[in-house]
Image (spheres, rainbow, N blue to C red):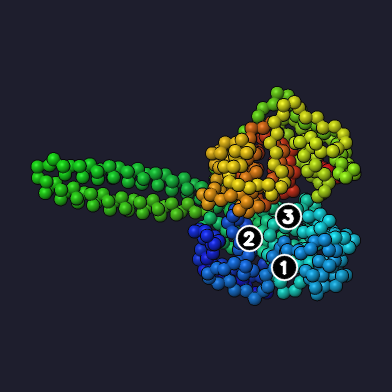
Amino acid sequence: MSAIIVENLTFSYPGSYDNIFENTSFQLDTSWKLGLVGRNGRGKTTLCKLLMNQYEYTGKIICNEKFVYFPCKIENKERMTIEILQEVCPSAEDWEFMKEMSSVDLDIEILYKPFDILSNGEQTKILLVALFMNDHQFLLIDEPTNHLDVESRELVSKYLKSKKGYILISHDRMFLDECIDHILTINKSSIEVYYCDFSTWLENFENQQKSEMLQNIRINKDIKKLQEAARKNAEWSNKSEKAKKGAKDKGFVSHKATKLMQKSKNLETRQNRSIEEKSKLLKNYEYDQDLKIYPLEYHSELLVEYKDVSMIYDDNLINSPVSFSLKKGDRVVLNGKNGSGKSSLIKALVNGNIQHRGDIFIASNLIISYIPQDTSFLTGSLTDYAVSKKIDESLFKAILQKMGFTKIHFERNIEEYSEGQKKKVLVAGSLCEKAHIYVWDEPLNYIDMFSRIQIERLINTYQPTMIFIEHDRLFQNTVSTKTINVV
């Protein structure tokens, strides 16, 4: 194995005045199973594209390995899956594909199906298998879990653990913990490399955050004192200047006032420099103020009830009958494989037009806040979105700011955002809505782990009534009160 050496890397997107990376240097080893973590928009995917030499930059990136990005682009997805695998990994024999597929629980028969009819989870697993079968390649794996159910995530994490040499971008904390041995974290003002598993890094990071939070409180107090002192000095200087006017010995007074003014200006300069230096110390604190939600109180205990409900698609039942009730304070997670009908079950609750068998009781005048899986409909400015949702724009933007948005993001249209930032728009919009029930369909796809922790803390604090689908096992365990298995 060899080293990946990054020296003085500086990069910004064309037309942008803000650098994504500035004089950044670090060194990795291609034998590592490396987890790449950081807030949405910090440059994780950008770093992968830079390693692949897809953008122009200044500085140096030195490595003898060939970088390959996952998910790879597939042309003509209507072809048979075996043809696509042979294209992705031309040196492998068919029996080798079959052997490797068994390790991620893929049926051999899917090799002879068109690639585009496979589920997203099947496509993810089979492309990972094919890419790992190529020799002399170093994989850059970007968000492989977003289309995987809980069971598939466990299979893929075991598969990755058996391999050596890759960089993995994922925000699923349990998934990372199962398959990495190093961490590279992109912070607000630095990039750091750690030799440890994810749990160890997270524990150290939490302790560091607590320490920095206390330090931030002290520094902010110092800054306020310095700002107050600077304000008083400015007032004193102005009074000294006014004293020149009307004085009998104008030469003496003017000379004295000038000296006092200069002394005051020097003191003000030192104070401002101290304020600037202290402000720089507020560098890597990630957990901003807690998020808030505004659930409405409903007058009765039972809000929703499913009785032997099976969803129908193309005249076929897609799940076994499901029965459960949703009462005030319940947080129900629907769990099951991809394609088992989970999304259809909650869409039937939201719009009522989804074909099904069985009965769904919905309490009268129930107000529902809904987050769909899809983000492709998001266009225009944040102001446009707030108007369309009839939510308070100031509150909406304040929530996004707490989730890592900066002034730059507020100036861009939503279609320019990363997938994680688009998901945050949907979550923030839902948090602004006053509702009896919050219905969220895979709200955390692409969202960074820092925001996941904020959302978990929010739900456990306010305890809104919810039905949600989410394959992040730690999120499930942390916030749900009831699990319904859909088969």
Which SS class for mark 2? helix
x and y, in percent, of residue 463 in the image: 67, 35
Residue 178 in view (yes/no): no
The reply to whether callout 1 and callout 3 are in contact (CB within 8 Å) is no
- Which residue, given by chain and number where applicable, does mark 1 sit on? 164
Task: Tell me the kind of residue under disc 3.
Answer: Thr
- Which residue, given by chain and number where applicable, does mark 2 sit on? 45
In the image, residue 413 sits, relative to residue 1, either above or below, namely above
Instruction: Residue lying at the far top in this picture: please name it.
Output: 299
The N terminus lies in quadrant: bottom right
Which SS class for mark 1? loop
Instruction: Bin the neighbour count of mark 3 within 10 Å (Cα to Cα): few under 14, some 14-19, many 20 and up.
Output: many
- Which residue, given by chain and number where applicable, does mark 3 sit on? 145
Q: For the point 51% across and 47% down, which residue is it? A: 213
Which SS class for mark 3? loop
Question: Mark 1, mark 2: which one is toward the viewer?
Answer: 2
Q: Which mark sits nearer the N-terminus, 1 or 2?
A: 2
Q: Quadrant of residue 302?
A: top right
Q: Which mark sits nearer the N-terminus, 1 or 3?
A: 3
Task: Tell me the kind of residue under disc 2.
Answer: Thr
